[in-house]
Image: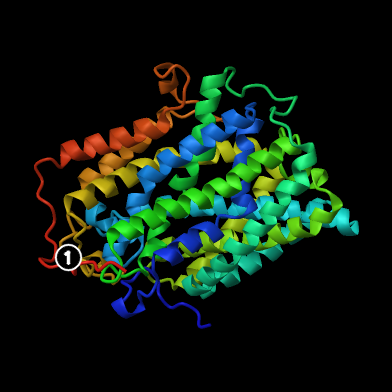
Amino acid sequence: MPIEQRGVDTIPEEERTSGPRDLISILLGSNLCLGVIVFGWLPPSFGLGLWPSVTAIVTGTVVGIAFTAPLALVSLRTATNLSTSSGAQFGVRGRLVGSVVGLLLSLGYTALTLWIGGDVMVGVLSRLTGLPDTGVSRAVMYGVLAVCTVVAAVFGYRLLLRMSKILSIGMVILLAIGIFAYAPDFTTAAPADTEYLLGSFWPTWLLAAVAAGLSGPVAFITLLGDYTRYISPRKHSSRKVFWATGFGLLIGLLIPQLFGTYTALAARAGAEYAGPLVEAAPFWYLAPLLAAAAAGSVGNAGLMLYSMGLDLDAIVPKATRTTATVIAAAVATAFVFVGSFEWDVQAAMTSFVLLLTAIGTPWAVITLIGHVRCKGRYDADALQVFNRRSVGGVYWYRGGWNVAATASWAIGAGVGLLAVTTPFYEGPLLALTGGVDCSFVLSGLAGGLVYTALTARTSQAAVPAEEPEPVAA
């Protein structure tokens, strides 16, 4: 299979050969990994039992999908990734906001996947072979996973799609076997040594809904376009792509996260997940657990790293996608080492997802408002001005920046950061929300309302008069 040569340039119509089923496969297969499973452990680690954990995860995921899934339709129309597509609202240089947000999201989730996957693999090998569970052995495992991930990401979309189709079947089987493996120890109560993280039930439940449920779909706000840019609107309707995105995210996130909740309760995983998960596994399930940790980690991290390479390629147009991917992998691996040896996993995960959700949400809201306003019609060629290192076009605005959109995002992100609560930081606006983290809602509302107000009298940038009519597949 040849290495993909496309960066963030426009995908030609003849190469847009994927369809809604491929989208479901990649959203399911890539998420069946420990890097997503571990989010199901967060609610029990916050002090919630089975049903509060399940309702928090399901509610947060459904709300997040309703907000995130429409973004898939943007790249369906522009034939490029979402951060580049956002140039229609932010300007061809202002779309760097989306590239940075996407880079940070992918960087964090890639590091988390390698971190948790590597820890579980070392723990399993320690039980199977007596391998010492030391910092050196973990560092070696992180490195091995990172190299495998780079290979998958460098080859690009086609290889990742094939891997996802295989993983969507293989990982479901491995997780189904895991339900029986952990069944003898399963309990519906939260681990005995945990209390409500925020002191009472409802604030803790809302935190779980955001940190474990909502964060899953929000992680894809810049990623969905990486896949839908390969789907042709001439062959597949927007309706089918939208529902495929929603369904793929729903099963792709709920299956692994609910498995994480189930195993966290069975393993009595309080302050840590990887260690208790391995210790509670019956000996016969260790080999399947090792396979799940290895294959799932490479599949998920590969997709995240692929997106990181595209975002870095968008930030530095002179860099090739391959070079950008290798650089991104090196940075992600460095974060794994720092996280593994210096940070508490629960605190790091919670802080990471809440902060990036607050920053990313207003960008997504502004992009969606622009998509509705232009009725899905874009000048695909004008979006590539920055990549060609030229100037001009309908999305040039002022020096390549739409000041109104950029300022609106900054205000929304600022409000979100002032309203967030994490183990490391609490924003001053929490006093107005009763201590409940409403950063997602407030950041999105602030960014969207300011953008709407600032652009109420501004005419939309010119777009092509004709757009190919979608043909239902």
The answer to which of 29 and 326 lies nearer the viewer is 29
Residue 222 appearing in the image: no
Picture quadrant where residue 80 is located:
bottom left
Q: Can you give x and y, in whole percent of width and height, for residue 51 in the image? A: 59, 30
Q: Is residue 449 above or below residue 338?
A: above
Q: Residue at x 66, y 63 (%)?
A: 295
Residue located at (17% from left, 39% from top): 454
SS at mark 1? loop
Residue 402 is left or right of residue 183, and the answer is: left
Residue 289 is drawn in which quadrant? bottom right
x and y percentages locating residue 29 in the rendered image = 55, 60
- Which part of the image, by quadrant, shows the C terminus? bottom left
Q: What is the x, y in percent for residue 337? A: 68, 52
In the rendered structure, the answer to whether residue 76 lies left or right of residue 434 reads: left
- In this view, the residue in front, 119 or 174, is 174
Badge 1: how crowded within 10 Å, few (<14), some, or many (20+)? some
Which residue bears the numbered disc 1? 392
Q: How is the image coloured?
A: rainbow
Q: How many marks?
A: 1
| Residue at the bottom extreme, as displayed | 2
Residue 418 shows up from this direction:
yes
Residue at 36%, 78% in the rendered image: 15
Left-right relation of 80 to 282? left
Residue with the most extreme right position: 130
Foreground residue, 174 or 198? 174
Give amino acid for label 1: Gly
Drawn side of residue 188 relative to residue 77, left or right: right
Q: Which residue lies at the image location 33% right of the left edge and 41% below the top edge?
A: 362
